[in-house]
Image (spheres, rainbow, N blue to C red):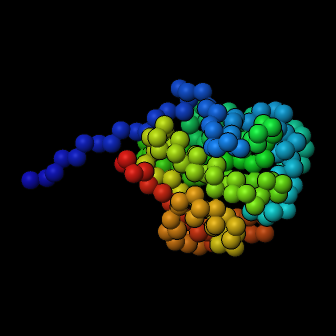
């Protein structure tokens, strides 16, 4: 006799809620992007250490404002979510978020970057852990993953410190500024699932 399994319910919704402000710890807050962050965004995308791992460039204030405005649209469309990582002065020092959100399957990809001025203090791992907690506890996702170039050793350390387990290598999987890269795949599965 076949075993009948109750179908899983989809994870929560984004469009029905306001993007929250999340407290990572005493020093860091995750908040929605705002137009006043445009210069920080331009600074980030012109930073060689960040640009090395991206294809996209933002060369003008207008492009940075479009990048910021696009996050609200992608939130409403339930595709992606991004937060500015703000220090105690509320100035953005980095980014963390979810890409390729699939609420039916309960999955998303975690992303992060940090300006050079905020590096060396574990910022990326701390905010990634906060996004993980919100994704599992509030949004109801089942599996989170992240990918980074096999050449990006700093990102690998962040993934490990954030609790992600390396699952393997995706060969020639993502195009960066200097061409196609093999990517490490790391993942976490919700303990509640």
Q: Left or right of 54: which side holds 183?
A: left
165 w.r.t. 71: above or below: below
Nearer-the-camera pick, 148 or 22: 22
In x, y percent, where is residue 51? Answer: 81, 59
Nearer-the-camera pick, 50 or 88: 88
- Residue 75 is drawn in which quadrant? top right
Q: Residue furthest right?
A: 60
- Residue 27 is drawn in which quadrant? top right
132 w.r.t. 91: above or below: below
Residue 139 visible from this viewpoint: yes
Residue drawn at 81 percent across, 63 percent down: 49
Residue drawn at 87 percent across, 50 percent down: 43
Nearer-the-camera pick, 160 or 177: 160
In x, y percent, where is residue 89? Answer: 80, 37
Residue drawn at 46 percent across, 40 percent down: 137
Q: Left or right of 134: which side holds 96?
A: right
Q: Residue furthest left?
A: 1
Q: How many marks?
A: 0
Q: Left or right of 173: which side holds 37?
A: right
In x, y percent, where is residue 62? Answer: 87, 38
Residue 83 visible from this viewpoint: no
In x, y percent, where is residue 101? Answer: 54, 45
33 w.r.t. 99: above or below: above
Residue drawn at 85 percent across, 62 percent down: 48
């Amino acid at each position: 006799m076949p075993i009948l399994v109750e179908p899983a319910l989809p994870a929560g919704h984004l469009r029905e809620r306001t993007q929250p402000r999340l407290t990572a710890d005493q020093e860091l807050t995750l908040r929605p992007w705002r137009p006043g962050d445009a210069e920080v965004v331009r600074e980030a995308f012109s930073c060689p250490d960040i640009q090395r791992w991206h294809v996209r460039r933002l060369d003008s204030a207008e492009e940075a404002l479009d990048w910021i405005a696009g996050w609200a649209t992608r939130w409403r469309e339930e595709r992606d979510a991004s937060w500015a990582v703000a220090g105690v002065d509320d100035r953005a020092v980095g980014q963390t978020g979810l890409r390729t959100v699939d609420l039916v399957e309960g999955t998303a990809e975690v992303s992060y970057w940090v300006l050079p001025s905020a590096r060396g203090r574990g910022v990326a791992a701390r905010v990634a852990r906060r996004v993980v907690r919100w994704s599992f506890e509030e949004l109801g996702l089942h599996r989170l993953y992240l990918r980074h170039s096999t050449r990006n050793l700093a990102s690998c350390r962040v993934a490990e410190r954030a609790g992600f387990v390396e699952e393997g290598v995706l060969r020639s999987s993502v195009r960066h500024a200097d061409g196609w890269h093999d990517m490490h795949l790391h993942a976490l599965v919700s303990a509640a699932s």
